[in-house]
Image: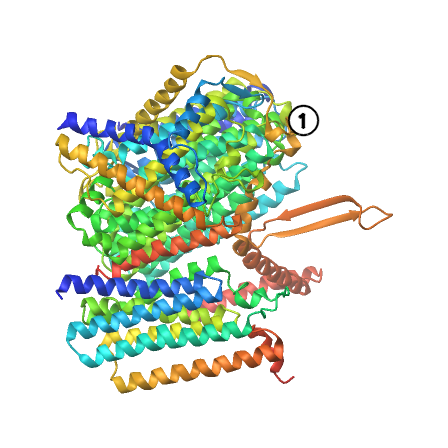
Amino acid sequence: MNDGVFTELLDLACGAFLLAAVAVLWLRQLTSIVRAFALQGVALAAVAALLGLREGRGELLAVAAGIGLLRAGALPHLMRRALAAGAPGGDGRYQEDVSEARETRPLVNVAASLLSAALLTFLAYAVARPLVALDPTPVTRALPVALAVVLIGFFTLVTRRRALAQIVGFLLLDNGITATAFLAASGVPPIVELGVSFDVLLAVLVLGILTTRMRAAFGGTGIDDLRELRDR
Amino acid sequence: MNGIGTAAVAAQVTLVVVGAPLLTGVMRKVRARLEGRAGAAVTQPWRDLRKLLRKEAITPVGTGPAFRAAPPLLVATTAVVAALVPLVSTATPVGRRADLILVVALLGLGTVAVALAGLDTGTAFGGMGASRQMTVAALVEPTILLAVFALSMPAGSTNLSAIVSGGLHDPVRLVSPAGLLATAALAVAVLAETGRLPVDNPATHLELTMVHEATALEFAGPDLALVELGTQMRLTVLLGLLASLAAPWGIATTTTPLALALALAVLTAKVALLGTALAAAEVFWAKLRLFRVPELLAGSFLLAVLAVTASYFLTGA
Amino acid sequence: MNPAGTAVALAAGLAAAGAAAGALLPGRARVPAVGLCTAGLGTAGLVAGAAALDGARWSARLPGLLPPAGVHLAVDALSGLFMAVAGAVVLAVAVYGIGYAAGRGPHGVASRGVQAALPVFALTLVLVPAAASVSTFLLLWETMALTSLVLVLAEQRGRASVREAGVWYAVMTQLGFVLLLAGLALFAAGAGGETFTALRAGAPALSPAARGTVFVLMAAAFASKAGMVPLHPWLPRAHPEAPSNVSALMSAAMVNLGAYGIVRVAFDLLGGGPRWGWLLVLGTGALSAVHGILQAAMASDLKRLLAHSTSENLGLVLVGVGAAGLFASAGHPLPAALALAAAFLHVVNHAVFKALLFCAAGSVARATGLRDLDRMGGLRARMPATAGFFAVAALGAVALPPGNGFISEWLLLQSLIEGLTVPGLSTAVVLPLAVAVIALSAGLSAAVFVKALGVGFFARPRSERAAAATESPPGMLAGMGLLGLGCTGLALVPGMLGDGLSRAVAVAGFGGGPPLAGDGLELRLEHLAASLSPLWAAGALTAGLLAALALVRVTARRGRRSHVKLWDCGGGAPTARMSYTATSFAEPLQRVFDDVLAPEQDVDVTPVRASTYLVERVRFRRRVPDRIEHRLYRPLIAAVDRLGEAARGLAPGSAHRYLGYGFCGLVALLLTLAVSR
């Protein structure tokens, strides 16, 4: 693989990675959000695989495969299951539960979220510039993308109401961090990556259970309902 | 050189004028087929135009010069844009003046003229259409100019000939994230500027959902023909512009008659393909609520911003 | 003698004659005499400015005039540009003003005081750019502020809103003056002299802290004159409430001096400001541009709308100035010169089209007594010339070809694209945002002026007053005609200004070649391979228009147009009450920017007494208050009020106590002096 093609492919993968994060902000339907997240997992795996191919490191390819399985396969599957559990039953009766499947009214409206994402991207670029300047290679130049995804993930976490959208926000954050690790240092050792991945899996499982419990307790997954748990 | 260059410009304009109604015909046909109908012939829009042009010209009482000037102005702005944009050849005598910002502004002039005509009628629908059209136009502007900014960064100029020939010589530029994002942002902006789904439904008959159509309600006869032709030409030119920016292959950079003929054929194919794709996509899209449109435009604005930043950080400027 | 010098002397003489005529002449002769003197003064200013732009330089020192320092005047290309703009605006508006003020009552715009102040105000507009020492500058500046205050208050009888505007204007302009005084005094003390030559020579010796302070004080003072956020609240009050010829002068000539001040002090005298300072200027400009145009989009008072649009346009000018400073501080003279040239060109364009817009609005106000767009309409048939002039000026304001505003905004965008060659974080982040801001304000200004023209002048009249309107007298039309010619000339052959602009930019001292190449018909930017030929574009548009008309003519069976009733989807001709108003036109935009504008609306539903389901009347009211003003000034004014209330305890009414305050103050002052020496 020559330099030009590698750079081109890496840039495209990073672009897709960032776009998927933007799509999460843009979309309302939770199933679409999960799909965008899955696509991001694929893009992340592609970044790892490209780096592995480039540097001829087998373990990176393995990590890439693992990431692909976990982030594009297992996690979206788990989230879809959580969604399906909350969907109105198929007994044919009309049920007024449409809001559960959609992020209807985020704390910051969609247009403003998108504009904020634009500003966050600039911020990421500003922050990453000195880092890039240390060693300006095609790989490190893409670093701002990863930082931007971290910021957008955090933003999602802050502004979205539905528990599932929040989980996706958290996972975006994690994807961003992983991408930062790949781009800045060609990835952390596989064992650490493995540990982190398990952590994430566990977190999603726990959050999934929490969602179910919330639905049982409040009849919805609006995070604001949690306020009621506070002691007065 | 100059003779053939001039011929190229004339060919562009003629192709756009003659081809615009046909493109609409093709798009309607595609839509009809996908919906399981036979659909009218591809030349039907031309027949409609002929019929309208032969009708009596009508001036509604209470309207003024703005109402009468809008239809020819819409056609004129679009025709000038058709002459400027390097659809067929980059080596034309007007290539030096083909500034992307000027092109955007000329299209804006057409929009403003039609909006003023809508207000000039003094009807509620006309005012409604004008208000909505200007709102959308105002919000599209940042997206377009930022996309222009992103596209002109690698070329170092807003000159369209320079951008297009730059893309021809250095195709990597086109498939880089910056190029792709800018094209995507521009595509959304084109949908909004030409009043297609999901921003506006060109085939609607329900006045309350209209945007562009509402401003044109009072036109009849030759005036209506010009408005229709202008709208169709706008779509054709903007699709052609998009094709030239995203896939400039086939555009003549030399001034041989053969290259020119080839470029004309390629252009026709590209625009027809884009039109077909758009028509097919429109079958599956629903019109957005008017107040969801800003969301769409904010999204395309974000794409344009990302295009700019991507060309900064990925090319390491 | 130098032509510039002669012209300046002539202008001063004419101003004195005009002021005397205004104060002394009786009723009928007053307005024409003052108008002619002012027009002559404007012509002299235009000639002086044009001579300076052509390369002439002139300076004079009049030691006897203002002892001890004397009056210093100097004219270079930079002053020439602003003098020429002010002179041209004064000339046209003075001609307009003769018709506008003729036949008015003894109070208001034709009164002695107002007519005497008008030539003095006009003179200061022309002379402020020629001031060449701190004391001269401050003197002219303050005279300008005071005379304009008198003019703003011209119609204060019976209108409380005028008095309120006057108070706002007086307070803000004096605050600005205090900042200016502090800044210039600091600068002069640091540089060791008060003439501009001394300041220029002493500027390099200033410490960075002093430079920064001077820069911020000056920038704030001048920005308040230019109506920049957050120092803008006077502008949308004073401009609409003043008589329209005064609004035209203020909006087209006075606010420019804010931009002039920043360029003169920061580039020429200070020799460039700090980088963060320029970022601040650029940011303020961008914020004002968006804020101004959004408020204009919501406004339904025609003159208020124009005032907000002034704030927007000056914002764009400051974006150009800030970008120029940013590029210059990074050591890139070429984009800096281009950005500054764009800013200057926008000053010129804005002055001409905004003067014309205000004059046309004044015509409408004079003919109908209306400023509310919602009640206008149908004026194009009743005042065709005024409507035509408004349309020409609006075309300039919307930044679309073939209007003159488009050219300067095009140049501004080109300078930002050129600025991409400047490395550095701030440019990388700031430039795209600046482009987005310019684009958004251009897009919104299209909506704003479509609203003003379409709702105010087109369709049918929405009130009896609008229906009874008649065209303005020829004097006013002549003034507007001059401005209309200016708009058209600037729109078609901006290249004529090329050399003058290059000379004016050269005063800023960036070095490097001239930013623009042009042969009168075309603007060329060689290194960007970009060129714009407005005449060609206009010609091509005309050709296209003729072709389209020919197509119709050739194919049409019957040549005559027949006039029929409006169709309105079968509804038949609607009444004027059904047509869209300015408020309804702005509604979608207001919804889109709901979070930014935070409009207040309330709906009153009055049911019929018998049943709550039958509605007798629905009242809907919506206000879009200026949020910055609400958040910033309300608490401030409240705090000042509280302070005032608290201070009442100090004034019990005893004369001994008051004398005691004075005595204590004197002793304390002397003590401080004694101790500190």
- In this view of the protein, can residue C372 be seen by the observer? no
Q: Which amino acid type corresponds to the residue marked 1 in the rendered image?
A: Glu
Q: Nearer the viewer, residue C84 or B162?
A: B162
Residue drawn at x 54%, y 15% is C562
Give the percent coordinates (x, y) of residue C645. 66, 62
Residue drawn at x 56%, y 17% is C563
Give the percent coordinates (x, y) of residue B224. 47, 26
Q: Is residue B155 above or below residue C125?
A: below
Asked where in the image residue A53 lies, by quadrant, the reply is bottom left
Which residue lies most toward the right here? C610
Q: Nearer the viewer, residue C68 or C186?
A: C186
Label 1 marks which chain's residue?
A: C
Q: Nearer the viewer, residue B262 or C279?
A: B262
Q: Which residue is mark 1?
A: C464
Query: Going by the image, does C668 lie left or right of B92?
Result: right
Q: How would you rate the neighbour count of disc 1 (Cα within 10 Å): few for under 14, some for 14-19, many for 20 or more?
A: few
Q: Looking at the figure, which quarter contains the N terminus of chain B?
A: top left
Mark 1 secondary-structure assignment: helix
Residue drawn at x 48%, y 70% is A165
Q: Is residue A50 above or below residue C51?
A: below
Q: Looking at the figure, which quarter contains the C terminus of chain B?
A: bottom left
Give the percent coordinates (x, y) of residue B244. 25, 42
Instruction: Report how many numbered discs are placed on residues in the image.
Output: 1
Give the percent coordinates (x, y) of residue C649. 68, 65
Q: Nearer the viewer, residue B33 or B298?
A: B33
Residue drawn at x 43%, y 33% is B40
Query: Going by the image, does C303 lie left or right of C347?
Result: right
Asked where in the image residue C580 lies, by quadrant, the reply is top right
- In this view of the protein, can residue C200 be seen by the observer? yes
